[in-house]
Image (cartoon, rainbow, N blue to C red):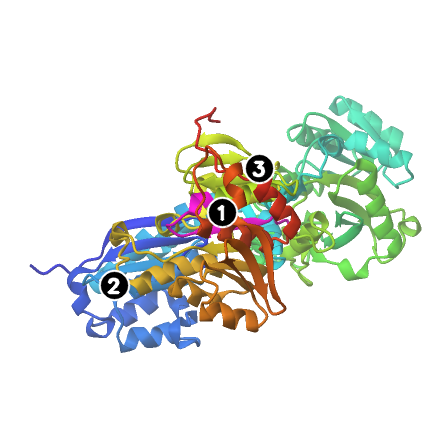
Amino acid sequence: MNRKTIEFLRVTHLDGPNIWTYRPVLEAWVDIGDLEDSPSNTIPGLYERLTGWLPGLIEHRCGVGERGGFLLRLREGTWPAHILEHITIELQNLAGMKVGFGKARETAERGIYKVAVRTRNEQVGRACLQAGRDLLMAAIEDRPFDIEGTVARLRDLADRRCLGPSTACIVDGAVSRHIPSIRLTEGNLIQLGYGARQRRIWTAETDLTGAIAESIASDKDLTKRLLKSCGVPVPDGRIAESPEDAWEASEEIGLPVAIKPVDGNHGRGVSLDLATRDDVERAYRLALAEGSEVIVERYVPGNEHRLLVVGPRVVAAARGEAAWVKGDGRSTIAELIDRQLNTDPRRGVTEDYPLNRILIDEDPAVSLELARQGVAPTDVPAAGQTVLIQRNGNVAFDVTDTLHPDVVETAVLAARVIGLDVAGIDMVAQDVSRPLAEQSGAIVEVNAGPGLLMHLKPAEGSPRPVGRAIVDHLFPDGESGRIPIVGISGSQGGASIAHVVAQLIACTGKRTGLACRDGLYLGLRQVKPGNCASWRAGRQLLMNRGVDAAVFEHDARSILHEGYAYDRCQVGVVTDLQMDASLAEYYIREPEQMYTVMRTQVDLVLPDGVAVLHAGDPAVAELASLCDGTVLFYALDPGLPVIDMHCAGGGRALFLHDNQVVVAGATGETPLFNLAALHPAMSGKPMLQPLHVLAAVGVALALDIPPELIRAAMDTCVSLPTPAIQTNY
């Protein structure tokens, strides 16, 4: 029976670093059936259909290493699993979720492949994978495919599931500093760093942003009063209780005035330069629809500016500009808006665009502005006649490099008065390259959680690295946000080693978490029984602000099924590469495949970290060459050639000599303690194997725990507790 189709046997999201890459991936086991006999160059029209639907495939370099590399492979002949990899990547890119990594590898079973693609969101990745399969089958079978509808659907899903641009740029800033991140919700709540050294952000708000400061900023009247009391220039004004009261306030303050909601945002309900009673009363109603109260202020002439203050610095500034149309004697104002303004490629309805499309029916402020000029959207202006559509328009024109020091100082003072560590300061001035006092400029709002898109994608000017600025504010002076992490991989003694390591670290005063097959521990207290050598349990430790250091046990199955809970580790231990027959389920059946799985622990060691490797297993010892950091060997036999060579080259090793635990290096050998002395302290507890002791002590040395503290801890503190079921929470 001819079976030319593509079937998914299994699709798994690997949440952490894995055998493919350091980042989360979607791994699909794919059965291509009889298509194994049909490489791409044997299917008429396949190349043309795929490149017609997905012209962006030309940018895929593939293994060729240059632009057009994948298309070369496609023309010469490649298999559907490989094609599916690239289609899935391209669909994610078209959905707005930029990725680039992918791999397709055949298994030992004919027609079955593993396809792995990087994805920033599991749901979007799965949707792109399924759509990619459908597109590829349509191309193979020469059937129509709705590429526009598919991309629109995927883009909508990505918009709903992925991080917003402000949050994403902060996460990208953390990546540039090698600071890890964890998404805590399906929204924009993000943890940067691990354990006790973590910080949290929610869009552009941080865990240093006080609730009181945020509440003050949301009350425009209170904000003004506090700023004025500290000498910050603000426009005079007061709360109005009704349209009639708004007009009375306008007369008291002096025309023209500005009217806005007290607790509005994003400029909604704001009307400027009002000079007639009719305009004031209509503006009052517009503002009340956007907030709980309405404030009337002296109108400050000039352009609106947004200054982004992060800590003690202004890191970006943008200017707003008015939007006008010019009549041609034939077109209505609505038609002119669409033709002269909305055709600007910088305008759109999503956050991808620095300028918003002007939609009259959805923006009452535009209708009010037109009414003030005595015109309607259906009117036809005379040729050459200009009509004001928006005052200031979008604040999206970068002016960071033009700021006068007085302007910078005033903005920073305003943020400090309110108490915000990250603030968007709305300032009205004719020219921010001059002092405010010279031009009667003023600060009209202070915003908590300011949007960052205007600085990331300005309509004109240079993008500003505002995400990195916020990360530098949260992690000053080179702080990494990392806690010491120890990963232990293998099938022999992992739990025993992990327990001893956790207790050795605890003896240094650090609050230590442990996730292993015996349970989840905080210190000596078991908080969850059962096998916790898993990604989910590991994340519990990394999200816990009370954890100063963490120890994780891994086996090959958890690595293959979930990936690691952390991105990198300070110390990585590999005990063995012993094959497990049950791993055949994952198509792991040969020693070299096991090597690929277990090497990942060494791959994750930080450049300033240490791999602790069992030198008595030649396959484990071979992993030393893969480590970005240094290597410490351990073995029972002191005479292993690999240890002699390692120490001669300046490395360190641990071994047993006459029952003494000895650390050796280029300068000689130093006894640490007698192994027999541990036995009384271990009375009534499961016996530690000498090899496990060596591995644990190796980790302690790798973490720079002093030898005398290791000796004292092993003599008095270290035990191997039998798992006891305690309260699970």
Q: Which residue in the protein does label 1 denote? A: 162
Q: Residues within 10 Å of mark 1 (few under 14, many from 20)?
A: many
x and y percentages locating residue 270 in the rendered image: 71, 38
In the figure, is residue 312 to the left or right of 664?
A: right
Using the image as rendered, state which of residue 207 and residue 568 is in the foreground.
568
Q: Earlier in the sequence, mark 2 or mark 3?
A: 2
Q: Residues within 10 Å of mark 3 (few under 14, many from 20)?
A: some
Residue displayed at 25% across by 54% down? 584
Whole-angstrom CA distance, mark 1 to mark 3, is 24 Å
Q: Is residue 503 above or below residue 173?
A: above
| Quarter of the rendering occupied by the N terminus | bottom left
In the figure, is residue 373 to the left or right of 453?
A: right
Residue displayed at 59% across by 57% down? 671
Q: State which mark lies toward you, 1 or 3.
A: 3
In the figure, is residue 14 to the left or right of 235?
A: left
Residue displayed at 30% across by 56% down? 579
Whole-angstrom CA distance, mark 1 to mark 2, is 29 Å
Residue displayed at 27% across by 61% down? 136
Q: Which residue in the protein does label 2 denote? A: 139
Q: Is residue 35 above or below residue 435?
A: below
| Magenta residues (range) | 481-496
> Residue 198's image quarter?
top right
Q: Earlier in the sequence, mark 1 or mark 3?
A: 1
Using the image as rendered, state which of residue 698 and residue 487 is in the foreground.
698
x and y percentages locating residue 82 in the rendered image: 30, 65
Q: State which mark lies toward you, 1 or 2.
A: 1
**Mark 1 touches mark 3? (CB < 8 Å):** no
